[in-house]
Image (tube, helix red, strand yellow):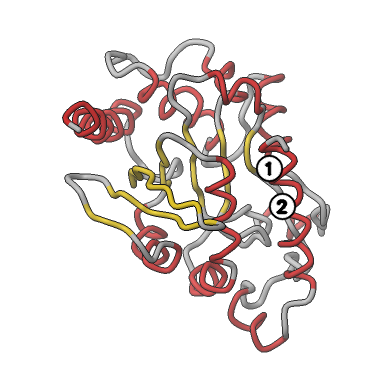
Amino acid sequence: MSKTDQLESLFDKWREMQKNEPKESLQNTMLKDAKIVEYNFFCKDGIVCEKEYDNEPVKVLFIANEPNIENKSNIVNGKKPNPESSQLNSFIEYYESHKDDWSGKLRKRICEILFPSIINLEENEFPVKNGWENAKKIAFMNLNKRGGNGSIADHLKHYCEYYKEYINREISIIDPDVIIWLGKNSFDMCFNTVFNNFKSMDDYYCVTIDDNDMKKTYPLICTYHTSARKSDVNRAMDIQNKYKKIKMKKMLE
């Protein structure tokens, strides 16, 4: 079974678990005072294009917090999200249009700065040209599939705790060479909740996931969220410096 099919099967189970989540739990895992987000909303993510992802010399998974459903535009216009939304479609749209109209420029900064900074450690000019071509080469996932308002709130940690098994299973299926966690605030709040087995290294972490008796360790880098006020070069250098240490450790093993 392909990784894409495995993810679809996982999302079917995850979606059903969300729909049947008890009210007592929803009080903690769902954004409080939500105007648009509903308990049954589920935004799929994962591998944008499995063929291109598998062909990359370094398979990179980007982890973000949650889809920003409760944004001002949606609230003002009363725009309800599609319960079967897909974050992957957003990356395909960016690939086709070369434009990123999101306020935090998440897709643009991943494809033109963050991903290239790992693939080519000698690259020092950012953003790279034609970075939109990288949109099909990555994997991307949100921790909270139900969505929120883009801020770091307690519901995110509770959601990670309740759905930790599913989050870890998704990472295991994607099976990246390196994980990039976007956002230091969410990292501080949720990292210990998502991962039980980890080791702190020099500027990065090694997280071990035990999935169906298959145990594997992944290097993880925490870096600035794409909406943080940092220069393109600072974003790239932060990742490059940390990833160089991961490569050096592998060479010494």
Image position, residue 44 (x, y; %) = 71, 48
Q: Which mark is residue 118?
A: none
Residue nearest the viewer, comparing 133 with 231: 133
Q: What residue occupies the far front of the structure in this picture?
A: 213
Q: Residues within 10 Å of mark 2 (few under 14, many from 20)?
A: many
Image quadrant where one finds the N terminus? top right
Q: Mark 1 belongs to which amino acid?
A: Gln
**Within the image, what quadrant is residue 49 found in?**
top right
Image position, residue 148 (x, y; %) = 62, 62
Q: Judge from the rendering whether residue 20 lies leftward or rightward of residue 203; answer left or right.
A: right
Q: Residue at x 53, y 37 (%)?
A: 106
Tag 2 secondary structure:
loop
Image position, residue 95 (x, y; %) = 66, 21
Q: Judge from the rendering whether residue 83 lies leftward or rightward of residue 74; answer left or right.
A: right
Q: Mark 2 belongs to which amino acid?
A: Cys
Image quadrant where one finds the C terminus? top left
- Residue 94 visible, this angle: yes
Q: Is residue 104 above or below residue 165?
A: above
Q: Which mark is residue 43?
A: 2
Return the residue at label 1. 87
- Assess whether mark 2 and mark 1 are in contact (beta carbons under 8 angstroms): yes
